[in-house]
Amino acid sequence: MTEHHTRHRVVVIGGGYAGTLAANHLRMRTDIDITLVNPRPNFIDRIRLHQFVAGTGDAMVDYDTLLGEGIQLLVDSATRIDTATRRVRLASGRTLDYDHVIYAVGSTAAIPSVPGAAEFAFPIAEFESAQRLRARLDELPLDAPVTVVGGGPTGIETAAELAEQGRTVTLVCGATLMPSLSTPGRKYVATWLSRHGVAVFESDVVTEVRSDAIVLAAGRVRPSALTVWTTGFGVPRLAAESGLRTDVLGRLLTDETLTSIDDDRIVATGDAAAPSGQPLRMSSQAAGALGAQAANTVLSHIAGTEPAVINLAIIGSCISLGRRVGIRQLARKDDTSVNVYIGGRMGARIKEVTCKIGLGKIRREARKPGSLIWPKGGPRPAQPTSATPVVTAT
């Protein structure tokens, strides 16, 4: 590594999978002052939140075990990126001067529009909501009816975790059970859920949530002492509130190098980035690679070289079914599933290894910046599309 005389100030906003790896990756240069801003003092391993809720695992990790030497962790929340003065304004009243920002604010639970859901349902996408859900579960008798709304990986894993403990669980999918799985993969998951007593309503939709029940289409009422809401994700509105252009969901619009289309000193990564208006699937699998790519883009901007475009393939997914069984769905580089999966105890082992790899990549990057490798070759648009829906904050 070459020593440089000018110090470059980079503020990384968000300490999730993408932001933490990006901060470590920036240490490929020794002349960068790196500040990581995160609202919590600990890293949240979100892919284990369903375990935390069920009391079968932990989801909190000490940043001291993840961040490389020299990175300043600032426990605070960014409230605005002032691009004119190059300052990040924080909830505490502090400001941070920057030369470059990595925007890695991640995703949140979407605010449900179903009547009663905001009042009575418990989301699981963030640690604080998971804490409230776990406390409520601890108050309930084992035979109290629990409803999980959402047929994606979070819904399935939560329902499976609770069913394995002997709870009475209903899973309402709203459409298709885990549509990204192959037909054989979906059948495997459905069979496991059925054998463990989970009542699966695949095509049913929840039209109302009450304190002690859910209402399905056609007015059918089912008792529910606790309703867990796992459908939909949103993103923080920091980009929009900072006057930067976003997509309809609120993700920062970037080019294919992850650079903001409004300001080349701001680079986005992870769930809150919308490159060419066509974001990648929200996943921890993509987050690490996107974190490294965002850091590489900043390094290129500093060096005055042309940054590389996104080159990432998402190849399948892993789902846990309780603590002893899982499924590894194989997929092509374009993230479309093939009719091949690995289930049973081997599937569970692959899932656990995959979870550990997520943190392992971050730790390795802390030890050896620039070490991350990832599958490449996934499809991306040749040019940004002019017809992309855009929301401009005022």
Image (tube, grey):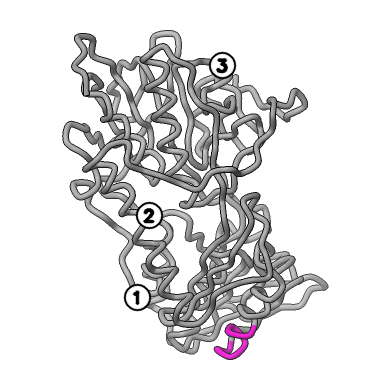
Quick check: is 193 in the magenta stretch? Answer: yes
Give the mark, 2 or 1, whose residue is nearer the N terminus.
1
What residue is at 21 percent from the left and 32 percent from the top? 72
Residue at label 3?
262
Left-right relation of 277 to 284: right
Q: Residues within 10 Å of mark 2 (few under 14, many from 20)?
A: some
Q: Position of residue 262 (x, y in %)?
A: 56, 16
Q: Are marks 2 and 1 in contact (CB under 8 Å)?
A: no
Q: Which mark is residue 358?
A: 2
From what the image shows, is residue 187 above or below residue 36?
Answer: below
What residue is at 63 percent from the left and 80 percent from the top? 188
What residue is at 53 percent from the left and 44 percent from the top? 376
Q: Are marks 3 and 2 in contact (CB under 8 Å)?
A: no
Q: How many circles with numbers are drawn on the protein?
A: 3
Residue at label 1?
56
Q: Position of residue 258 (x, y in %)?
A: 52, 28
Please name the amino acid that badge 2 sits on.
Gly
Give the mark, 3 or 2, whose residue is nearer the N terminus.
3
Dominant secondary-structure state across the stretch colored magenta: helix
Alpha carbons under labels 2 and 1: distance apart: 19 Å
> Could you say which is closer to the camera, residue 256 or residue 379?
379
Between circles 3 and 2, the one closer to the viewer is 2
Quick check: is 42 in the magenta stretch? Answer: no
Between circles 2 and 1, the one closer to the viewer is 2
